[in-house]
Image (cartoon, helix red, strand yellow):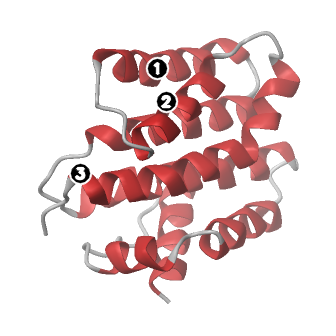
Amino acid sequence: MELTDADRRLLATWTADCAAHVLPLFEAKAPADPRPRQAIDGARAYAGGAKRSAHLRTLVSAAYAAARDVGDPAAAAAARSAGVAAGTAYMHDSVDVDQVKHVLGPAMYAALARELDANNDPTAAAAEIRWAIDHAAPAVRALLRRMPARGPGRTRQDALYFELDEGMRG
């Protein structure tokens, strides 16, 4: 399967929404740090037609730096969600199972952020996954169905990716 720029823009809209949904978890811990919000804004600008640029790559890196700096696991996962969302613009044209991780990454990190914020309660992650699935446009779900499916893996993050993947395909 080959991704087009139009496909990446479609995905960027959904991934930005997933990241924005948990952004308050980051902003509660670091209200003066604009980096994850800027990454989400960059993803939305790209989704709306802006070109891929060095600035957008800088926003991706800055969101990851914010995740490292915040000192709270839930807030860090929320910042990573924003970074992966901004990185959607840079997904490779040729899709393999590892690329699916980039599609689902913002929603997976959002689910992880909710779970960590709820003292490792997996029902919080499940609710966030349901939100992400429910808010995916039919075209996003159809695009994902054309990509290779992820297996269950071994880690908690793998399990969240798998749950998202299955739900988006269902």
Disc on the earlier residue, 1 or 3: 3
The residue at the point 77 percent across, 50 percent down is: 114
Say above or below: 70 vs 160.
Answer: above
Of the numbered discs in the image, which one, if any, rests on residue 42? 2
2 or 1: mark nearer the eye: 2
Q: Amino acid at mark 2?
A: Gly
Of the numbered discs in the image, which one, if any, rests on residue 83? none
The quarter holding residue 140 reads: bottom left
Whether the residues at callouts 2 and 1 have beta carbons within 8 Å, the answer is: yes
Where is the N terminus found, in terms of image quarters? bottom left
Task: State left or right for residue 165 relative to residue 63.
Answer: left
The residue at the point 84 percent across, 43 percent down is: 117
Say above or below: 56 vs 4.
Answer: above
Task: State left or right for residue 36 relative to residue 12.
Answer: right
Say above or below: 121 vs 22.
Answer: below
The residue at the point 77 percent across, 68 percent down is: 127
The residue at the point 37 percent across, 44 percent down is: 88
- Residue, disc 3: 5
Tell me the element at label 1: helix
Give whichever of 25, 7 is nearer the camera: 7
Crowd class of label 3 (few under 14; some 14 to 19; many from 20; radius 10 Å): some
- Residue, disc 1: 59
Q: Amino acid at mark 3?
A: Asp
Say above or below: 76 vs 59.
Answer: below
